[in-house]
Image (spheres, rainbow, N blue to C red):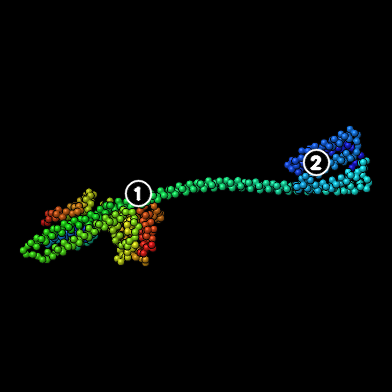
Amino acid sequence: MEATPSNGQLLFLAPLALLIIRGLRRFLDLPARLSWNNLLRYIWVPGVVLFLMGWVFNLHSPLLVDGYWLFVLLVVATVLVALRDYRPARTLLLALAPFLINKLLEFVLTGADGRLPKRFDQVLDTTQGFAIVWLITFIIIARNQKKTLEQERLQREEEEKAKRLIEAQNVELERLVVERTAALTFQAEELRSALTELRTTQAQLVQSEKMASLGELTAGIAHEIQNPLNFVNNFADVSVEMLAELREEQARPIRDPELEADLLADIAQNLQKIHHHGQRAASIVKGMLEHSRASSGERQPTNINHLADEYLRLAYQGLRAKDKTFNATLNTEFAPDLPLVQAIGPDLGRVLLNLFSNAFYAVRQRQLRGEAGYAPTVTVCTHQRGDQIEIKVRDNGPGIPETVRQKIFQPFFTTKPSGEGTGLGLSLSYDIVTQGHSGTLTVISEEGKYTEFLISLPINQAD
Amino acid sequence: MKILVVDDETDVRDLFQQRFRREIRSGEMSFSFAFSGEEAMTYLRAHHSEVLIILSDINMPGMSGLELLSHVKEEFEMPPTTMMMITAYGDDESYSKAMELGANDFLTKPVDFAVLKDKLLQLIP
């Protein structure tokens, strides 16, 4: 302290106090932390008042200046105490404490004449130096603390922001999931109804495929029935003639017993033939009915050789009826002692009919190309291999290219011109063999040489 | 008069033998039977001078009646005098094809044996 303090120092101290308060305000962010922050703006008022008082009353005491200075420091200390929860504030308080105590002691010990007793002056001067160093050191520390806190706060804010962002995203995701779930449920519902519709259509298609193949068969069947009927008529007719002749013979005076016996034997034989051909026609009609009927799904011991033979002829005659110029050699290699197979006859018949029709179609296609010396041939073989029965249907048609072979069992796949094939024949055949009879249906082919379908059926069906 | 009947139905033999039993008994006609076009060709190669008439079905597996007809006309310098074709399908196409190939007659199934008999008797020299 100067030896002759002047009241003018108050005018210097008042703005300084204001500066300190501003610094403090900025450093500690007072508007946010302190409710009576606004009062601090008037820190200059006591200084000015003291100055005016000193001027008016002509007072010249260093106590005025020191008092004001102490007042400013105490205000600062009070602010810091009020903000003790804030760490930089506490540090600042710690920084200020020695300086404040020093000033307090100085104020208390100073006599009314403004002079310190000599023995204290030395000590206080020393401690004041120390207190200032302490003050500055701790202000720096407080600054660092504040910076650290600020960083932490920023980091927390960042995290908070990220968290809020994630939450917002979660909400958005949740909304999307709900939206998507609703869409999916709707789609599933749509798909289910589409599936039901498809199943119905499929059932109808299967039936119409049956009817289509029945149409193919009709001509063959008509031909097949016509032949036995002709025999029935002819043998009946000729038998009537022969009976008349027999009566004539019996009426003769000289009878020829050998001729009569011949006639009788022939008549008996004819009756048998009539019966045989009648049966033949009946079985064809029965087969036709079975073919058109929805499958009963009942398995019965089935003679595969008979079935193959019957449908081979039906298929051949069916094609012949449509295309008079068509001709093919039919080879049948039936294993004579083939065991009966538990099978759904009409279903298996459809498969065979389909394979035969395809085989005839294939040889026809190749025949139409007009190769010299080409003899259209369709071969059917049956034989037993272990506990399986194999039926091979082979044609020497143009063969099936590899790319097509992969697709032939797919529904609606056809290589025939539109309107000629439904594309369902082989796919239905495949289902009948694999699902209906636990068998396999495979194809091998070489382009320009042959195609061979192989049906393999277990003799004893699993169920 | 030797007649070769070609049909894939084996009962045709019994039917013809009975229908023409009187003619066979009297020796007016004699019948041979072949159950395919190929078999008919083999038979003809062995007995071709004897056969006067061929009665052939058209719809047979393997060699058809029409093919048989053309083979016969090609292969034999002195073909049998008469070739009659029989078919279940009385369609114009088969008819014109048969006539073009040199068939003498064309019958449709069911065969009217009275008509056939008349036609055959007219051919007897």
Label 1 and label 2 in one chain: yes
Q: Which residue is mark 1?
A: A417
Q: Nearer the viewer, residue A308 or A158?
A: A158
Subunit bearing disc 1: A
Q: Which mark is residue A290?
A: none
Residue A402, percent from left and from top: 40, 56
The three-letter code of the residue at mark 1 reads Pro
Q: Does residue B107 appear left or right of residue A125 in this picture? A: left
How many other residues sit within 10 Å of disc 1, few (<14), some (14-19) or many (≥20)?
Answer: few
Residue A49, percent from left and from top: 85, 35
Identify the element where label 1 is drawn. loop
Which of discs 1 and 2 lies nearer the camera? The answer is 2
Identify the element where label 2 is drawn. helix
Residue A34, percent from left and from top: 75, 42
What residue is drawn where x is 43% and y is 48%?
A: A193
Q: How many marks?
A: 2
